[in-house]
Amino acid sequence: MKKILIVDDDVAVTNYLMVFLVQTELFDTTVINDSREVPELLTRENFDVLLLDMDMPNVSGLDILRLTHERGIHSPVIILTGVADVDLAVKALKLGAFDYLTKPVEDEHLLEVIDAAISHHDLHHSIDELPTQLSREGLAHKDAFEHIPTQDVAMIRLLHEAERIAASNLSVFILGERGTGKEMIARAIHNASPVSRGAFVLVDASAQDPEKFPAAFFGQARVWSGDREERPGFLEEAEGGTIYVCEIEHLTRPMQVRLRRMLQTGEYYRENSTQIRKANVRFIVSSSIDLTADEYQEAFSHDLLYHLMVNSLSVPPLRERLGDLPLLIEFFRVKGLQKIGKEVTGFAPEYVELLARYEYPDNLQELRNIVEASMVNADGPVVTVDAVPPYIRQKIASQGRRPRPAFRPRKLAEVEREHIQQTLEYCANDRQRAAAELGIEPERLEAVLKRGEPRVQA
C-alpha cells in the first residue's frame, strides 16, 4: 500500500481527500493541517507521494518543495492548490514538482496523476540502480534497438534507460542536437512498449502550417455551413499507439496550451467541435534546442516543458561517441548499397581515421551523406581517402588550422567545484541527481561544496 502525505491548511479539503483516498483501499494516508509540522515529519517517515497546497501560513508549499530538494527526498510532489498562478506553477515545476493541479480536481483525474507520479518515481528509481557496466546483451527487447548501432558506454546506458521508460505509458522528451538519432530512439521506445502493435505516427512541427496545425493534430469536425468535411487528426491516427512530435519548439503558444491540457486530462476536442474525446496514445516529443534557455522564456510554455521533461533522454552528439564510427560507417554502407547501385565491400583504415577527425555538426545524418557520397566516388570495392567529398576534406583541414584557445592554468579544486556547481544548476539543485550525473558519491559532492559557497539558489 502506497503512503501519501497531504498538507493543506483547509481542514475540509484534507478531510475530503483522506476519505476519498482511503476508500480506494490503495493508499495509507497521513494528513497535516499545520505545515510547520512537515519538516520534522519528513525526517521520520518516507512517503511515496506528497500532495501539497501552495498557499499556506508559516511554511508554504514552495518552501516544502525546496526542503525536499535540500534533503534529497525524491518522493514525487503534486501541487494541489486554489491559486491559478502560472509563474508560481513554473517555479514549482522547475523545483521538481511532478504536476501542478488547480482546485477543484476531479477524483478520477487526481487518481490518474497520483498513479503516474508513483510510476514515474518507481521507473527512475530503477534507472538510477542500473549498473555502470551495461551491454546490449542485457536489453530485454534487443529487436527494438537493433537499428541503433553502438558500442559506446553512454549510448548503451541510454538504450537501457529508454527500455525502462518504454515499459510505462508516460510521456517522454528526447533532447539532442539535430541529426543525433532522436527519431530512432523514439521508434525504439515504441517498439519496446506495450503499445508496439499500434501505429507510430511521426509529426514534424517545423513542417506544419501554424494556423492549420490544430485541425491537423486534433482533427476537424464537419462544418455544416461550409464545404469542410469531418476528418480525423494525427491523434486519432495514433490511437492505441505512439505519437511522436519532433521539433516541438515550433508549436504556437495556443497549441502548447491545448497540448498541455490534453496531457493533463487525456481529453481533447476536434476543431469546430465541443465534443470531448479521449486520447489513448503514448506521447513522445523531441527538440534540438535548449528550451530552458532565457531566450525561450516567453516563446515556450514552461508549464508544458517541465511536464514533458519529467521523463527525458539526452542523446549525445556524434563527436562524443567517435568510437562508434566504424560501426556506423558499416551500418550506412549496408543501408546505402541498394541506393548506390554498385558493389562496395568495405573501407580503408585511413578512410575511417580521416573521418574521425571531423566534428559532424549535423551528426548521424551528415555521416550518412558522407558515406554514401564516398561510395559513389569510390573507384573500386574498397572506399579510400580519395573518395571523401572534397568539401569535407577542406573542413577537416581547416579544423586543424584553427588557433588554439588561450589557456590559463587553474587549480583542480577550482575546476571541480565549478563543474559541480554547473551540474547542480542543470539538476535544479537536486544534489542526489547531481551526484548521480557526476558519477560520484553524494558525500563527495557535499565535501566539495563545503569548500566554497555554490552559486545555486536553493
Image (cartoon, grey):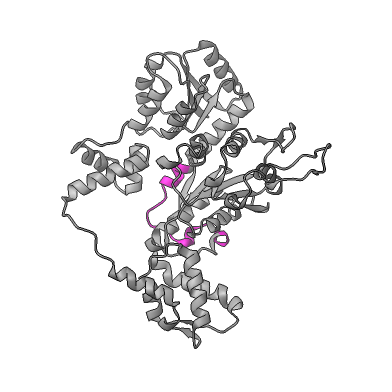
The part of the image, by quadrant, that contains residue 32 is top left
> Which residue shows up at 44% across the image and 28% down it?
47
In the rendered image, residue 201, in percent from the top left (x then y), is placed at 65, 52
Q: How many numbered badges does the structure rendering display?
A: 0
- Relative to 344, is 385 on the left or the right? left
In this rendering, the answer to whether 190 lies above or below 265 is below
Magenta segment range?
Answer: 124-144
- Relative to 205, is 126 on the left or the right? left
In this rendering, the answer to whether 442 lies above or below 12 is below
In the rendered image, residue 183, in percent from the top left (x then y), is placed at 55, 56
> Which residue shows up at 72% across the image and 36% down it?
277
Quadrant in the picture for the C terminus: top left
Residue situated furthest bottom in the rendering:
380
- Whether 160 is among the magenta residues is no
Nearer to me, 109 or 2: 109
In the rendered image, residue 209, in percent from the top left (x then y), is placed at 63, 48
Confirm whether residue 444 shows in the render.
Answer: yes
In this rendering, the answer to whether 426 lies above or below 21 is below
> Which residue shows up at 44% across the image and 58% down it?
156
Residue situated furthest top in the rendering:
11
In the rendered image, residue 249, in percent from the top left (x then y), is placed at 52, 46
Nearer to me, 78 or 24: 78
> Which residue shows up at 48% across the image and 81% down it?
346
Nearer to me, 436 or 452: 452
Nearer to me, 214 or 112: 214
The part of the image, by quadrant, that contains residue 217 is top right
Confirm whether residue 194 shows in the render.
Answer: no
In this rendering, the answer to whether 114 lies above or below 356 is above
- Whether 139 is among the magenta residues is yes
- Relative to 365, is 39 on the left or the right? left
